[in-house]
Amino acid sequence: MYNKRRFRPGYAIAEILLAMVIISISFLQLSRSLGNVMDVAKENIFVTRAINIANSTMEEVMAQSFDEKGSEAGGYALEFDGENDYILLSEVIDIGSTSSTVSMWVKVPVVGEGNLIADERVGILLGIGRYSPKPNANWEINSNGQIRIHWNEAEIDFPGSSDLRDGKWHHIAFVRDTSNNSLKGYVDGVVEIDENDAGTNLEFDEAFYVGWDHRQKDVNPNNDHRFHGLIDELQIWDIARTQAQIIADYKTGITNPFNNSNLKLYLRMNNGVGTTVFDHSSNMVHSPITGATWTDQSSSWSTILGKETEDSWSKYNDVDDFHTVSFTDTDYSQLGGRIYVKYVVVDPTSWAISDAGEGTTTDYKQITVKIGIPGSTDSTQLSAIKSAKIIQNYGLTYSPYGN
């Protein structure tokens, strides 16, 4: 009898063919999926690399000065010529026996641009006392451009580490804490002097000098200890301020100095005219200026964003030199970038940022770095704010005599 089952192998071949078609389709789908995975992985690599390039580029741009000229938009500072300029202050605190903080902004010329380096002490910022008999004390910038605390004829003699002879503004602070017998010195909020020796408590009966001291004025008036450079925002406190407090002032300034009982002297140096510098503390120790001259910073910023005469990236010396600069990463040639710089306004209360308007210069510039992602319209974008003297953009709550 005829057996229909003998023809089953033909049906098995059809099944095999169908299975092969299914496998082929699956393989194509798998290949397509793997391709998509590879594309995603490649894109992730590009994105990661773009983020790294944006960060490193921003760090390089932000390391430059706000501008190659000036200290602040719309303000003043006092310039000392290193010859016979000084401010004479009364004894605002018993600085020899109490804790104290002395802080200020300084700008020292670069070596070769008239900077006095003939003597070991080339820049007395604040000097107190006599040559003989003792006591005496100086807060200085030494011949290496470093901050220095010199107490009672080298009983204390501590230098910092940064060379400030760069023609740029720096915020410096000196802290003497009698409660734990320590001395600290700060540059731009960073500790550079940290010693457990505050020196002998001394009793001073002399006035304070800014830019000079009694020893040089009365004993050796031709000595090169006098300060050469610009000083602004001088403060003297009768407490040892913390690093956090110093950084806060470095960033935002003091809005209500008149009502702070620990602030014994605050010379904003912002009146711009006359031979008197006003004290904005409650002591109101207004002081006479000898020789030092007002320098107007109101129009010191570059009105045009972009490089001046620099012809290469390595020569750019302020952040807006990078404005509209295009570049290609040397490791991944597919990744190209562009830098934009513009003036912005920063609200001192909310820190909200807004455009400054055409042709307006402010104390803040916004830097934006964009890195394009190959094969995509997307880009990695990083923005940051560069400030001039960070202490700017605040208003005094109360001042009985203006600036």
Image (cartoon, rainbow, N blue to C red):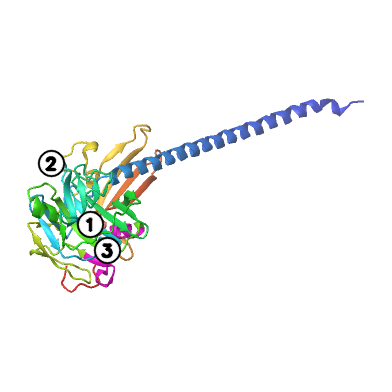
Label 1 sits on residue:
104
Q: Quadrant of the N terminus?
A: top right
Q: Secondary structure at mark 3?
A: strand
| Residue in the image at 51% along x and 35% along y | 38
Mark 2 residue crowding within 10 angstroms, few (<14) / some (14–19) / many (20+): few
Give the answer, above or below, for where 16 lies relative to 258: above
Tag 3: amino acid: Trp
- Single out the mark in the foreground, 1 or 3: 3
Q: Position of residue 48 (x, y in %)?
A: 43, 41
Tag 1: amino acid: Met
Give the answer, above or below, for where 40 lies relative to 357: above
Q: Does the image show residue 173?
A: yes
- Single out the mark in the foreground, 1 or 2: 2
Q: Position of residue 367 (x, y in %)?
A: 29, 49
Q: Earlier in the sequence, mark 1 or mark 3?
A: 1
Report the span colored magenta: 244-265
Tell whether position 212 is magenta. no
Q: Earlier in the sequence, mark 3 or mark 2?
A: 2
Label 2 sits on residue:
118
Q: Secondary structure at mark 2?
A: loop
Tag 2: amino acid: Ala
Q: Are marks 3 and 2 in contact (CB under 8 Å)?
A: no
Q: In front: 53, or 255? A: 255
Q: Quadrant of residue 22?
A: top right
Label 3 sits on residue:
237
| Residue in the image at 38% along x and 33% along y | 332
Q: Quadrant of the C terminus?
A: bottom left
For this view, does 148 lie left or right of residue 329?
Answer: left
Q: Position of residue 12 (x, y in %)?
A: 76, 28
